Amino acid sequence: MTGMAEPILISIAAALAAKSVQSVYDFVKTKFANRKEAKAALEAAEGRPEDSIEVKRLATHLELAELDDPKFAENLRQLWTSANQTGVGGTVINNSMSGTSQGPVIQIGQMGGGITQPGA
């Protein structure tokens, strides 16, 4: 195990915390069902931002599970890749925002035209 989990595992952990990819969440939850500390890390990360200690701890548990079970590692990464594809010729856009916003947050992949804020 390295000092810090791979960036892909941190991204997966952040998605698990947000429950944004149900198939990956269910797969990991099943794997962690009999792993007390890993299951607790999954639960503690729920709703936490990507840069939180809870998400980093969850990424570490993912890394340990991958080291322990290469088939789990292969399946996890295949699920993650599948979840992030839009199809042949499609564009994959991954947006994330963490922290506090003092105004509206708009995340856009491609846009023609402009955005006008009412009252501005």
Image (cartoon, helix red, strand yellow):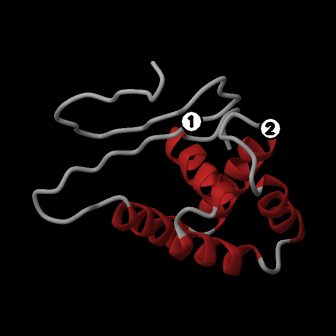
Q: Quadrant of residue 3 in the image? A: top right
Percent of width and height locating residue 69:
60, 70
Residue reaching furthest top? 120
In space, the residues marked 2 and 1 are separated at their CA atoms by 16 Å
Q: Quadrant of residue 50 in the image? A: top right
Is 116 positioned to the left or the right of 106 in the image?
left
Percent of width and height locating residue 59:
67, 49
Q: Are marks 2 and 1 in contact (CB under 8 Å)?
A: no
Residue occupying the point 72% across, 46% down: 55
Percent of width and height locating residue 23:
52, 76
Residue occupying the point 71% across, 48% down: 60
- Amino acid tagged 2: Ile
Query: In the image shown, does 103 or 116 lie closer to the viewer?
Result: 116
Residue tagged by mark 2?
53
Eyeballing the image, is 105 above or below 1? above
Residue occupying the point 52% across, 66% down: 21
Query: In the image shown, does 77 or 50 lie closer to the viewer?
Result: 50
Query: In the image shown, does 112 or 13 lie closer to the viewer?
Result: 112
Is 84 positioned to the left or the right of 105 in the image?
left
Count of marks placed on residues: 2
Percent of width and height locating residue 76:
50, 67
- Amino acid tagged 1: Met
Tag shown at residue 97? 1
